[in-house]
Amino acid sequence: KIMAPDAFGDPTHVERFLREARAIARLRHPNVVAIHGAGEEAGLRYLAMEYVAGASLAEVLAESARSGERVSVDEALRVGADVARALHAAHEAGFVHRDVKPSNIRVADDGRVVLLDFGVVHDTGAATLTATGAFCGSPPYAAPEQVTSSAVLDARTDVYALGATLYEVLAGVVPHRAPTRAALFRAILEEQPAALRTFIGGLPRDVETVVGKAME
């Protein structure tokens, strides 16, 4: 992973790049992408990371939509459980990922599920890099506290995003949809997503309960 040269002069971008390196280096877990080194070469800052042959969960979902075949419930739960293990390791180390979403989850060719991209990670033991009132994350998977920027982010922020991701894997759509970001944020704050059984018949009630609890 290479840092864009035009970001070199921005101390915030540089610090986020270094924080990502430090965060991943501290997380030795089979479901977290490994980092082998970091440095600067020919004027480029870089992270030397594990190469995970396979496809992102976003690519898996796109192919599923093209083929008309949904990801099975069993596979969705397997992926969700592996990401939950990765997040648990991150939370135990004092990190909040803040950007859990299908494009940051990779399904390796051997079936291993790997959590990627700690670029906006929040280290609970360090000073924040986000200005008060500034949004940080990906809108469709953002928890209410990210939308309002009025609460301290903690492990529950990632739990919500994992719930929203599992919702999309199972339903084929994100929990909340709106034409503008402002309208999307209002929906996240004020509306309940449609029941998963609306999209997938015969879904075990326990599955719907777990996904709903994650987003509660």
Image (spheres, rainbow, N blue to C red):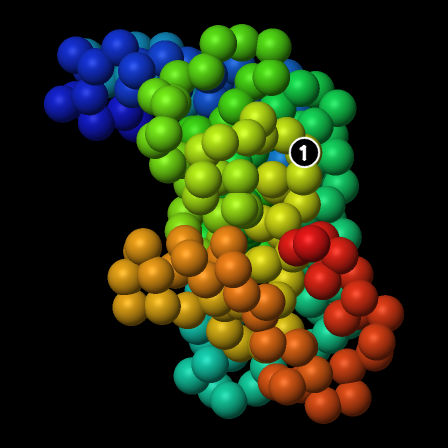
- Quarter of the N terminus within the rendering: top left
Tag 1: Cα neighbours inside 10 Å, few (<14), some, or many (≥20)?
A: some
The percent position of residue 113, horizontal first and vertical second, equals 65, 50
- Using the rendered view, name the quadrant where residue 134 is placed: top left
Pick the front one: 41 or 56 = 56
Say above or below: 50 vs 63.
above
Q: Residue at 71% x, 68% y: name it.
A: 75
The percent position of residue 142, horizontal first and vertical second, equals 49, 48
- Quarter of the C terminus within the rendering: bottom right
Amino acid, disc 1: Ala
- Using the rendered view, name the quadrant where residue 183 is placed: bottom left
Pick the front one: 212 or 96 = 212
Say above or below: 132 vs 72.
above
Residue 31 can be seen, yes or no? no
Q: Residue at 76% x, 70% y: name it.
A: 208
Pick the front one: 7 or 135 = 135
Does residue 107 appear left or right of residue 111 in this picture?
Answer: left
SS class of the residue under badge 1? helix
- Using the rendered view, name the quadrant where residue 14 is placed: top left
The percent position of residue 141, horizontal first and vertical second, equals 50, 53
Does residue 76 appear left or right of residue 164 in this picture?
Answer: right
Does residue 147 appear left or right of residue 95 in this picture?
Answer: left
Pick the front one: 180 or 98 = 180
Residue that label 1 marks: 155
